[in-house]
Image (cartoon, rainbow, N blue to C red):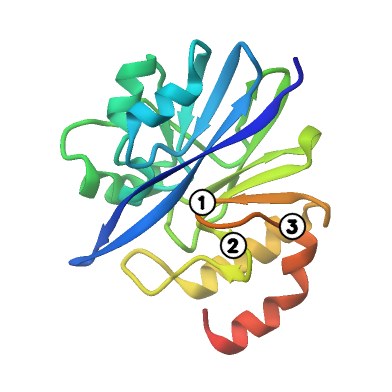
Amino acid sequence: MAARVEKVVTSGTFNLDGGSWEVDNNVWLLGDDEQVLVIDAAHDASAITAAVGEREVLAIACTHGHDDHVNAAPALSSQVDAPVLLHPADDVLWRLAHSSDRPSAALADGDVLRVAGVEVRVLHTPGHAPGAVCFHVPELGVVFTGDTLFSGGPGATGRSYSDFGTIVDSIRSTLLTLPEETVAHTGHGDDTTIGAEAPHVEEWIARGH
């Protein structure tokens, strides 16, 4: 079976800097009938496990360490017996969500993960969070952007450990170099494409978000 992308939407809260917001998160499964890579572990480990079914989970790959993307990671890791992967620059955010549990291994820019016969390339895209990464799957023409790029612009940078100039640089230098037809599977909300977002960078800069 060819590799495919599946989405599970989970709901809960995002908590940072003393605030709490209700959010719906996109959890992505990349794989085939035998094995999957889970991208982000948001809110509900059991719902994600149910979507995985009997397939082998090769890893739980986190786009960044905000609690709404990792709050179910330790429980999911236990349920499906898979390692949790996170860029070490987001350890400060991970520790806000989990005081004792630790990620299993580190992600780094240029790493290549493999699942269901396709390569998943790790792109370090700081800005929304210092250790934010995206996962590019050239063979499928998709990139999983987490909270770095959405339909309509970059992820939020108004809270601790984020920076607007940095996220714009990440999008320009890394994501916008991908083919314009590349579909961006985002951490929240609807998909977009690189080509749809590329013309609007100067608008984002002008508005400051």
Q: x, y percentage for residue 66?
A: 35, 52
Task: Residue type at mark 1: give it.
Answer: Gly
Q: CA gap, disc 1 to disc 2?
A: 8 Å
Name the disc covering residue 193, or none: 3
Residue at the image point whose x is 69% and y is 61% from the top: 173
Residue 150's mark? 2
Is tag 2's residue or tag 3's residue first in the polypeptide sequence?
Answer: 2
Q: Residues within 10 Å of mark 2 (few under 14, many from 20)?
A: many
Give the residue pinned by disc 1: 187
Q: CA distance from mark 1 to mark 3?
A: 14 Å
Which residue is drawn at the image coordinates 69% and 76% (left, top)?
201
- Image height of 170 relative to 74, above or below: below
Q: Position of residue 122 (x, y in %)?
A: 60, 39
Please name the amino acid that badge 3 sits on. Answer: Thr
Mark 1 in CB contact with mark 2 (< 8 angstroms)? yes
Which numbered marker is on residue 38? none
- The structure residue drawn at horizontal position 49% and vertical position 21%, both measured from the top left corner, is 52
